[in-house]
Amino acid sequence: MNERRLKRKKINLNSLIDDEGRKRQKVCGNIKVFFDGNAIVNAICRMIRRPDIHYVMGACAWFTNKKIIATMANELKGCCIITTRDKILTAKTTTKKYASLPIYKRSDSEVNTAIRYIGNGARGYNKSLMVRSY
């Protein structure tokens, strides 16, 4: 067993970040998979810009990407994003970005905002997060 351990080649995981193959999309049937952060953002923006997309509904733990928010503000008729209540949401720059988003409303009695929050904003053990490991 010790011989096996000695013969294994050690890989520096940090060197894999610059691997060009990682930056390309992988296709499996009709599903496209992205592993690079910029490729993921570009794919989301490309899907939002499609001519048959008018509304976006979704949920995410944090929603602060400037490029995605700008694309949604320019291309959509309405959107509704549910996100975790966090201290970043009270920043002036964040509220300014969210104000540019078009609002999806089913009725006049609904909340007049494109971003809706869940949780109480607490920290520590009692914090409410959308992030879970599956």
Image (tube, helix red, strand yellow):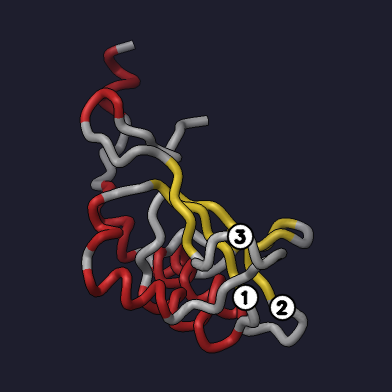
Check disc 3 and give the amino acid type: Glu
Q: Quadrant of residue 66?
A: bottom left
Between label 2 and label 1, give the one nearer the viewer: 1
Q: Relative to 36, does residue 6 appear above or below in the rendering? A: above
Between 111 and 126, the one lying in front of the other is 111
Q: Which residue is mark 1?
A: 78
Picture residue at 22% right of the left edge, 34% below the top = 123
Check disc 2 and give the amino acid type: Ile
Tell me where residue 21 appears, x and y as whole percent: 46, 66
Q: Which residue is mark 3?
A: 110
Between label 3 and label 1, give the one nearer the viewer: 3
- Dot 2: element: loop
- View extreme (top): residue: 1
Between label 2 and label 3, give the one nearer the viewer: 3
Assess disc 3: are there few (<14), some (14-19) or many (≥20) residues with their C-alpha within 10 Å of its C-alpha: few
Check disc 1 and give the amino acid type: Gly
- Dot 1: element: strand
> Residue 53 has which mark?
2
Q: Relative to 119, does residue 74 appear above or below in the rendering? A: below
**2 or 1: tag closer to the N-terminus:** 2
**3 or 1: tag closer to the N-terminus:** 1
Which quadrant, please, contains the N terminus?
top left
